[in-house]
Image: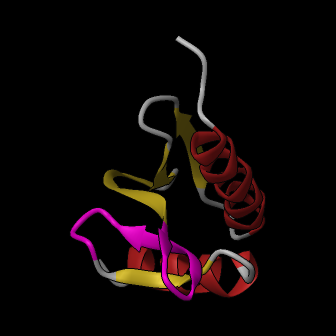
Amino acid sequence: MSATPREHTRTYFLAKLARELELHGLTTTLLPYPPALRVSDPDTVMLVETVDCVPLPEGWFYRWSWGEVVGLADDPALAAQRIARVLANR
C-alpha cells in the first residue's frame, strides 16, 4: 500500500516536530500508519503522549491524542515547547 500525499505531508510535519522535541531532551518515535508521533520523557518512561498532524481550514496543525490542537505545524518549535511543558508537569 503506497502512502497518500496527505500522509506524506503529515510525516513531513511530524519529522520537523520530532527534531524540535529531541532538542528538549524528549524521545520520539514516528508511528507509520496512521502517521503520528509518540513522545516520551526518557527520565519518566511512564509519561507517553501521542501527537498527530491534521489539516484544518486554517492550515495544518499538531494535535494531542484527545483531539485538542497543540499548535500550527508551520511552527514546530512552539509546539515542541508546549508539549515539553505538558510532559514536564505530569
Residue 20 belongs to the span the image colors magenta: no
Where residue 87 appears, x then y in whole percent? 41, 73
Residue 56 location (% of width, % of height) = 47, 77
Residue displayed at 72% across by 50% down: 15
Q: Which residues are magenta?
A: 55-67
The answer to whether 62 is drawn above or below residue 75 in the figure is: above
How many numbered marks, from 0 up? 0
Q: Position of residue 86 (x, y in %)?
A: 40, 82
Task: Say which of 2 and 27 sits in front.
Answer: 2
The residue lying toward the viewer, choosing from 89 and 58, is 58
Instruction: Pick the residue in front: 17 or 73.
Output: 73
| Placement of 56 over or under 42, stated as above or below | below
Q: Judge from the rendering whether residue 43 lies leftward or rightward of residue 6; answer left or right.
A: left
Residue 53 drawn above or below residue 78? above
Overall secondary structure of the magenta stretch? strand
Q: Residue at x 69, y 59 (%)?
A: 13
Judged left or right of residue 38, residue 74 is right
- Left or right of residue 67: residue 52: right
Q: Percent from the top left, x then y, of residue 17?
A: 68, 63
